[in-house]
Amino acid sequence: MMQIPDIKTSIGLLKRKETPIHIMRHCVRVALVSRYLGSKLRERGCDLCLELIMAGALLHDVSKYESIRNGGDHAEMGARFLKELGYPEVARIVKNHVYLDYDPGAGGGISEEIIVNYADKRVKHTDVVSLEDRFRDLQARYGLDAMRRQRIQALYQQSKEMERAIFSRLEIHPDDLTKIFRR
Ligand SMILES: [Fe+2]
């Protein structure tokens, strides 16, 4: 039986890791976008667990603050933390939220990981933006040398492929997400 922390438990875990409020808000935003995409895809027949998507999205940056303070890969650290608590499925989503082993050729199925990874790429702080906007910001902040710029560019290409895979199943356009979540 899969163990998935509910919303209250997930928020409690973020607090336990002393997550600052701006990261907390980002996680909630990613969770709302993820749940929206997950439920739309479910309507289209994709076999997805919304509870798993919610927990994975809420907790994707659970170790972000720890990594800012002490260094380390926050995706790996978050995954380890959740695995030790007995949530291996949620851990897998957290581990894959930055870099995802994604091969669009391999069946082309949509997983919970793909949704959370993609939603995180669409949320800049708490704003829902286009992939182009988000990656322009990432390049400006982290593209410090040619190697890093190339890695970010590769991630952008992968995100575009995920976007095509997700929205080919839906009747809405990627830009509609920005409008739906505009505050
Ligand atoms: Fe992250």
Image (cartoon, grey):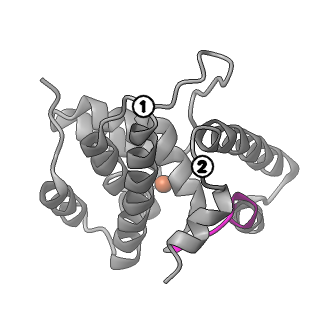
Mark 2: amino acid: Glu
Say which residue appears at 16% left-offset and 33% top-offset.
Answer: 86
Q: CA distance from mark 1 to mark 2?
A: 13 Å
Residue at screen point 18% across, 62% down: 16
Cβ of disc 2 within 8 Å of ligand 1? no
Q: Amino acid at mark 1?
A: Gly
Residue 25 falls in which quadrant of the image?
bottom left
In the rendered structure, the answer to whether residue 160 lies left or right of residue 150 reads left
Within 10 Å of the Cα at label 2, are there few (<14), some (14-19), or many (20+) other Cα atoms?
A: few
- Residue 139: percent from the left, percent from the top? 76, 61
| Residue 161, image quadrant | top right
> For the view shown, which residue lies furthest in the bottom direction?
183
Write down the residue under mark 1: 45
Quadrant holding the N terminus? top left
Residue 130 counted in the magenta span: yes
- SS assignment at label 1: loop
- Looking at the picture, how far across and down is residue 72, in whole percent? 47, 48
Q: Nearer the viewer, residue 158 or 75?
A: 158
| Residue found at the far top of this picture | 106
The percent coordinates of residue 28 (x first, y second) are 35, 66
Residue that appears at 52% across and 54% down: 119
Specify whether residue 130 is in view: yes
- N-terminal of the two: label 1 or label 2? 1
Query: Toward the viewer: 134 or 178?
Result: 178
- The part of the chain drawn in magenta is 127-134
Residue 101 within the magenta-colored segment of the rendering: no
